[in-house]
């Protein structure tokens, strides 16, 4: 715990603010809006369950996996 000129919970406030900012940044990177019916890359149909689970989805599961692996 920090000591000195700050109140005791100031460090916790900083940690909370950092975590909150990280969560907001992660949320901002998630897709949003209307999901595509077919993959943007390979044109394979995106299953309805995937479109409902991830609003704004643009890729089929295979292409999404390749994208996340950097391939």
Image (cartoon, helix red, strand yellow):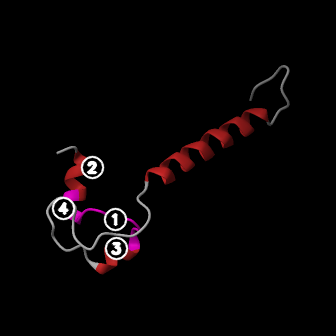
Of callouts 3 and 2, the N-terminal one = 3
Q: Nearer the viewer, mark 4 or mark 1?
A: 1
Give how far apart the Cα atoms at labels 3 and 2 are: 18 Å
Q: Residue at x 62, y 46 (%)?
A: 20
Query: How many residues crowd around disc 1 within 10 Å: few (fewer than 14), some, or many (20 or more)?
Result: many
Magenta region: 53-63
Magenta span contains residue 21: no
Of callouts 4 and 1, the N-terminal one = 1
**Which quarter of the figure has residue 41?**
bottom left
- Left or right, 60 with respect to 22, comes to left
- Left or right, 9 with respect to 67, comes to right
Pointers 4 and 1 in contact (CB under 8 A)?
no
Q: Residue at x 44, y 50 (%)?
A: 29
Of callouts 3 and 4, the N-terminal one = 3
The residue under label 1 is 57
The residue under label 3 is 51
Of callouts 1 and 3, the N-terminal one = 3
The residue under label 4 is 62
Of callouts 2 and 1, the N-terminal one = 1
């Amino acid at each position: 715990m920090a000591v000195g000129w700050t109140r005791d919970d100031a460090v916790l406030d900083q940690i909370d603010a950092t975590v909150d900012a990280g969560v907001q940044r992660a949320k901002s990177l998630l897709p949003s809006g209307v999901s595509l019916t077919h993959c943007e890359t390979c044109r394979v149909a995106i299953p309805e369950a995937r479109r409902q689970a991830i609003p704004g989805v643009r890729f089929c599961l295979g292409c999404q996996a390749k994208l996340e692996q950097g391939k």
